Image (cartoon, rainbow, N blue to C red):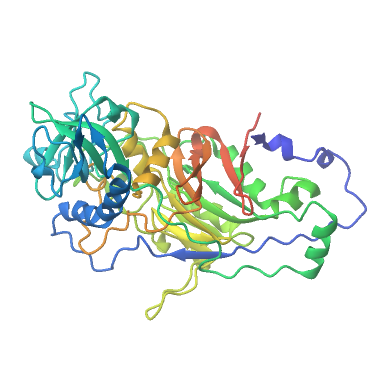
Amino acid sequence: MVTLDDVADKSLLQKPSPEAPESLERSESKYQPLATFALPKERNYHQQFADVYFIRLAKIKPIVEEIAHAAWEGTVVGGETATKVDRVLDVRQGQLCWVVGTVYMEMPLKPSVLEDISHDRWIAAPTTADKYYSPDGGDKIMLEDDSGRLTLVGSILKDYFLVTGCIIAVMGTENAHGEFEVLDLKFADLPPQPDRWRLSQAPKAKEEDVEMSDVSSGSRSKKIAIVSGLEFSGTDTSHAMELNLLLEFLLGEALGPAAQSELSQISRLIIAGNSIAKPSDTDAAGDKKPHSKKYGYDASSYNPLPAQLFDGFLAEILPTMPVTLLPGALDPANVSYPQQPIHPAMFPRARAYVSPPSTSSPSEPGWFDNVTNPWEGELEGWRVLGTGGQNLDDICRYIDNDDRLGMMEAMCRWRCSAPTAPDTLWSYPFQDDEPFTMKECPHLYFVGCQPEFGTKVIEGPQGQMVRLILVPSFAATKEVVLVDTETLDVSRVKITTS
């Protein structure tokens, strides 16, 4: 990690150079977004949410069955050969078998929709506890399909991250208490990974670039800047100076010629959620607002200043750098997953850079591309998957562990980016398809609004390589992440005023 002071040029304190400054040009961004998580304009919320899990099971079950069959075919334990069972309720006591199903976590502390309705709390925003698991061990792990549920037990379960909604295969036998003693466990693992430049065309190298690469270590590659948790606020000025420094850093206005040349290689900025701070109980003047609200919302307490500040921030960046904006839990977008793009009307100044609406075919992405959360696309030829953080935050509530990178890896190996939706993560009730299932493996997977930075590379059984990134909240850490577009190496810059 480097700080802003590390990249600042000390020559700024000297008199101007008589030489004319070098003319710099921002690197072009090769960008192709996908509409994987876009919802239809006409949405129906009358259907059952359970269909989401049935669709997910139908899509992933054949893959898990194939992996389990290859691993357990002919397995003998205690003189008995393991056999496949098609349904959970077909498991017989004492029979060594394996079965595929959806994990369901029975947790007393987990919120229940039926309980909310019975207490007339259905109209308010969802209440979320910090953790769902019980310290006293009162939770149960179950495996379910369309036939029923089966309780899973066994010490091997402690070696894996398991949450509601992931699809697994388990091998074992049912004991005298009607519980399934698990001896081994399998999941789908990483899906097939597309080649680079699958959707877009790779840029042609210029002759002078080729000549330079023959005599030097190679030309500088582009970089992608990822930041989250900007949290513009109308009352809190705790990090207003750092936000201004971040703007000047991205534009290269406060740095010397050498640093400006490096920063000109940043081809795109991705903002991954929580750009607007959580509203407080006070208005811009500091007066307390009444607590009486209609439908959980008090219109008189709305403060437009945070949105105006964020709009001004984008309007300063957009003339020189394209921006991709994902909504987050605090942003003015729908609560349910997947969140749809923030409406351009929220950005009176920045919306001039938005792609005009098209009624016939999908239009080219604009210089300012406000997208869904989660979001999928191809950036500099790499397949990229990103979220605003709600999916990972909800998984953390199920598990007594702080290994967030491990949980990101588990999502990739489950082939599901939001397994707990719609059980504890509010979601649209899909009927025909479920977009959270990973059809193709990303090269880069980032999650925004996290407590701290983290990154690692995971490998799949077919040679798939995935770069995982935890993007820290800028309001808390004052950090921005830079990704090299050729190597996918990651660095971070800390914006400090000290």
Query: Residue 185, located in which quarter of the rendered image?
Result: top left
In the shown orientation, is residue 346 left or right of residue 427? right
Residue 118 visible from this viewpoint: yes
Residue displayed at 40% across by 78% down: 361
Q: Is residue 134 above or below residue 440?
A: above
Quarter placement of the N terminus: top right
Q: In which quarter of the image is residue 289?
A: top left
Of 368 and 56, which appears nearest the observer? 56
Q: Residue at x 32, y 58 (%)?
A: 435
Among all residues in the image, which is located at the extreme top?
136
Residue pushed farthest front?
79
Percent position of residue 331, x then y: 38, 49
Q: Which of the two residues, 217 or 340, is positioned nearer the viewer here? A: 217
Residue at 18% over, 63% down: 44
The front one of 286 and 455 is 455
Q: Where is residue 280 in the image (x, y as percent from the top left)?
A: 36, 37
The tally of labels here is 0
- 98 vs 311, left or right, is left
Q: Determine whether 299 is above or below 32 in the image.
A: above
Q: Is residue 29 left or right of residue 232?
A: right
Q: Is residue 330 visible?
A: no
Position in image of residue 166 (x %, y %): 28, 44
Quadrant placement of the C terminus: top right
